[in-house]
Image: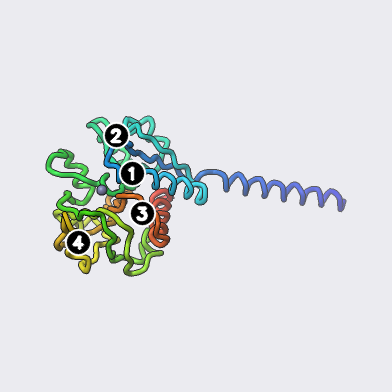
Amino acid sequence: MKVKLLKIAFYQLLLILCTTTAFSQTPRFKVLGLYTTTVEPDHVSFSKDAIQFFTQLAAKDNFIFDTTTRWEDLNDEKLKDYQVVMWINEFPHNQQQRSAFEKFMANGGGWLGFHVSGYNDKYTNWPWFVDFMGGAVFYNNNWPPLPAKLIVDDNKHPVTKRLPKKYTSTINEWYGWKPSPRLNKNIKVLVTLDPANYPLGKKNIIPDGDIPVVWTNTQYKMLYMNMGHGDQIFTLGIQNKMFEDAILWLGLKGK
Ligand code: ZN
């Protein structure tokens, strides 16, 4: 009798162990990172660092991070496998890819866009994307790339909860936008360029303005981050925590 009970207890324990292991090995979500190797060298070096950073994070936080330089992978068939799409250093190349992305977002997909991936101007001709970005159209930038003081607008949001109220970010090329996405009621700004930086730049100067650098359009599961120029972006621990919290927020939102 005793032996039998022990046996049952043993098998129960085995079952628990197996289930726990199986559970912890099931990836929590899948991310597809798209990038291009023929763009501005500083954007290529950012993509290398980003891929390394998110690959390590995927192993640590238990999600899948696939990458591709084939922007034609922005199609319904491919995207149905993924919960989050990341544009690392570019954007779709044609109408087909744009449409597939719009559909993915309308169906509740997640997007994390860095730096130039949010770039748009009067030649872009993609009104949907301008609206998605909260109306923000590229307006100006600083040059050379510089570190900048940032203000964290919301320390309670899941993406920025581990950041201090203010911090000095890594070297980046910062973009100004017109209009400021903050003016759009659907936009929640999480991080802003501190006016204490102005004038920012030497060759190209950002003289003033309300310039959000991290924001989300609450109509979508999306997050734009202006960081993404050069090889210093992932050198700051507290900011790296924001990148980690960002991908987890997008991947697990609504789960
Ligand atoms: Zn840049």
Residue 21's x, y, as percent? Answer: 62, 47
Q: What element carries label 1?
A: loop
Q: Measuring from the top left, give residue 223's x and y in whole percent.
A: 31, 51
Q: Residue at the far left: name it.
A: 122
Mark 1, residue position: 88
Q: How far apart are marks 3 and 4 (CA)?
A: 18 Å
Find out if the beta carbon at label 4 lies less than 8 Å from the nearest ligand 1 atom. no
Q: Is mark 4 on a helix, strand or loop?
A: loop
Answer few, some or many: residues within 10 Å of disc 3's Cα (few below 14, many 20 plus, some between 14 and 19): some
Going from N to C along the chain, the mark reached first, 3 or 1, is 1
Q: Which amino acid does label 3 sit on?
A: Gln
- Dot 4 crowding, Cα within 10 Å, few <14, some 14–19, many 20+: many
Q: Which residue is label 3 attached to?
A: 232
Cα separation between marks 4 and 1: 25 Å
Q: Do the residues labelled 2 and 3 touch (CB within 8 Å)?
A: no
**Residue drawn at (33%, 41%), measured in percent from left and top?**
107
Q: Nearer the viewer, residue 41 or 58?
A: 41
- Callout 2 touching callout 1 (CB < 8 Å): no
Residue type of the residue flagged with mark 4 = Leu
Q: Earlier in the sequence, mark 4 or mark 1?
A: 1
Q: Are marks 3 and 4 in contact (CB under 8 Å)?
A: no
Q: Read off the residue under disc 2.
A: 100
Q: Given contact means CB atoms under 8 Å apart, are the residues at marks 4 and 2 in contact?
A: no
Which of 109/48 is in front?
Answer: 48
Labels 3 and 4: the sequence-earlier one: 4
- Across and down, in percent, residue 140 comes to 16, 53
Task: Report how far apart the C-alphas of labels 4 and 2 lie in the structure.
Answer: 38 Å
Q: Name the residue under label 4.
A: 200
Q: How far apart are marks 3 and 1 (CA)?
A: 15 Å
Kindly tell me whether residue 102 is visible in this rendering: no
Vertical placement of residue 45 versus 169, above or below: above
Distance Cα–Cα, label 2 vs label 3: 32 Å
